[in-house]
Image (spheres, grey):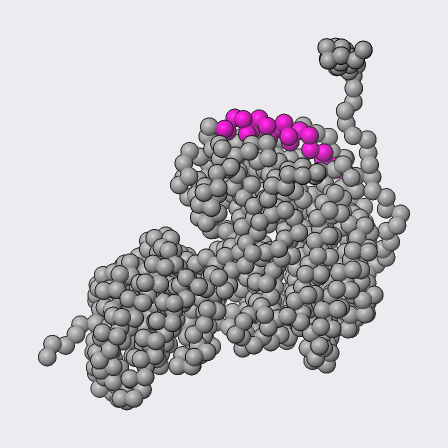
Amino acid sequence: MDTEPQRNRDMAETADRLSSVDVDWSLSPAPESTDHVQFDPSYDLFIDGKFTKSTGRKRFDSINPATEAKICDFAEATAKDVDRAVAAARECYRSTWSRLKPVERGKYLFRIARLIQERARELAVLESLDGGKPIRESRDVDVPLTAAHFFYYAGWADKLEYAFPGRDVRSLGVAGQVIPWNFPLLMAAWKIAPALATGNTVVIKPAETTSLTLMKLAEIFQMAELPAGAVNIVTGHGDVGAMIVNHPDVDKVAFTGSTEVGKLIQRSLAGSGKRLTLELGGKAANIVFADAPLDQAVEGIVNGIYFNQGHVCCAGSRLFVEESVYETVIDRLKQRMETLIVGDPLDKNTDIGAINSRAQLETIQRYLEIGQADGATLYQVPCSVPERGFWCPPTLFTNVAQSHRIAQQEIFGPVLAVQTFRTVDEVIQKANNTPYGLSAGVWTDKGSKIFNITQQMRAGVVWANTYNQFDPASPFGGYKESGFGREGGRHGLAAYLELG
Amino acid sequence: MVAKTYKLFIGGQFPRTESGRYFVATVDGQPIANLCRSSRKDLRNAVVAARGALAGWSARSAFNRSQILYRIGEMMESRFDALVAELRAQGLADAPANREATMAIDRTIYYAGWCDKYQQVLASVNPVASPHFNFSVLEPMGVVCQFAPQDSPLLGLVSMVLPAIVGGNTVVVIASEKSPLSAVTWAEILATSDLPAGVVNILTGFRDELLPHAAGHMDINAMAMDRPTEEQRRAMEIAAAENVKRTRCFDLDWSKPSSQSPYLIQDFSEVKTTWHPIERIGPSGASY
């Protein structure tokens, strides 16, 4: 008979048996199939609705950061190419896009959103292949959000008079956009969707290490029969971005990237009358109070800093733990870090993929040295990483002082700087004491404390008892040197409209 | 008759310029008053006062800010004749002087009423696809430095300053270089209106002298300038990049009704978005 004591004895025996043999608990490889994914060995620029040869001869390679193997190559756009792209955008704006009925503009965007959904798996695989991010993230975050962004702004196209009551709204003209390598498709959607919905046309440049999925997006624009010239994609390095930003026929500039480059752009646009929005760096504080749900907080800390290898401008890169629970939190955090799987971005079990480029890996490694030289204590999970490719195991620093460079400067990698605090006032001061102000996190089960902290944080996005959540309906953007302007939501429309 | 000494307004006090320098305001070539020619040091003192007042002012309830702004309107009304006389002394004819003062009071009442309403118009609850409560509210940018209109010494001044303080910012404003008297008299009104010291700080002096110091000041969050010249705009925007200041250039006819709106409050506001999970106990379990 199956009695309670009997069951307990059975379970104990099973446990004994299991512990006596050497059991390998690691997960078997679960690589995403890539046979359905096709791409060309070589891509031209996307200008006026067609893939167009560059006027120059220079090309550059895109490599898979997990293997260092070449994926394909892209054209390095010239000044002449940028001229052609801007001219195509202007002509489309003048003759077609600004004259289209708003509801028709919206339909194009809906169609684009649908096509992205239909090709979601292909896009996710390419995003991971080209950028190094885990397939789990590109599949579950990047691509669905990209489609959702187009879907969200599609519906705004014919409702703009309700977005700014009492004002007439007008489109601006040609938007010049420069986006980073950490979320290539998603950043493109953040920029292109509101620009098109509000009646503007676009010239956009992806980052040089992650141009591939934008070429796929160009194919989707073709399939959606988006009017030629409404979106033009030029590839190349930073100077191509500068050519777009400084082009005299561009009316509006939107940039996501480093604070350093953002300041350069702000300076170079001075006196031009061009509209500008900047989404720049961050050094977010993630604050854990003793009364927080600690297991959930540990998940939030991990998600905050190790999501997308820490290549996230709003990453929770500074952890503040209330002193009384410091040991507990760090112990649990280290245990949790040991379970993170570092490796093949295309494996569905992978938590932390490849660092996007050799240059970025070198930057991160420099900060690991700086952190130790400044006196902080480094902890890295012992884990094996593939021989080739760019890898950085999840890292945390304890014994960090507010003045340490790893507590002040954006590292843009899986590196967490841990500090402690005793009082609410102290942690507010410490959290706000950087030139950045993009995001913050707070963990506590006390509601009134949550609202005190969320109100006191000088940051554009504050996550309470959660972290790194994104949605097209949710405005995103920074305070202080993290930039200005918002992307997402109704507030995100303002950047692309003139209020009359 | 006793002639008035026109001084600066910093942190609720009326100091002279620390530099000991003065300039003469004139109408048709005739001197009408001596004014402080503010220095970089005066500007920095004003920024310190504004920064110090920020936390307290932005934490005031919207209702309280509204009451204080309405009180400013009351004080302006009680000094109506003096405001008009001073506008006339600065060269305005009777009717325009009357209109300028009347509209300045009306605009004050207008913005007093917005304090506890603009959030409801401009903030949002955002319908995100995940189980989170997500909302966006407007918050102050911080310390705002403004260069007031040259040709509308009172109405233009209040039209720029008030939306900024309605939004919880504190302000350092450089008065009209051409007609600076009304700004100093308005400061005396502010000083008797329950407006906390340092919320509005008023300097007189030269635009071109103060502009680079203000635009490059690392503790100013936003700059606004009425009708800058091309060179002034360029200079401001270049220096502003040093700490990614928000910059606004106005080219409005401040006497038009369309030159007052909650969108001017938004011009001096940041949008903050807050997320919190919603517990869903059910077949799928709790979500945090």
Q: Which residue sits furthest right?
A: A35
Q: Is residue A225 left or right of residue B152?
A: right
Vertical side of B233 occupied by A437: above or below: above
Observer-nearest residue: A370 or B153? B153
Residue A153 lies in the magenta-colored region: no
The C terminus of chain B lies in which quarter of the figure? top right
What residue sits 79% from the left and 39% below the top?
A347
Let me know if residue B35 appears in the view: no
Which quarter of the picture shows residue A24? top right
Residue at figure coordinates x 49%, y 35% from the top left: A289
In the image, the segment drawn in magenta is A325-344
Considering depth in this image, is B91 or B193 the residue closer to the camera?
B193
What residue lies at 38% left-to-right and 67% top-to-bottom? B113
Q: Is residue A228 visible?
A: yes
Q: Indicate whether A252 appears above or below A320.
A: below
Predominant SS along the magenta part: helix
Q: Report the quarter where the N terminus of chain B lies.
A: bottom left
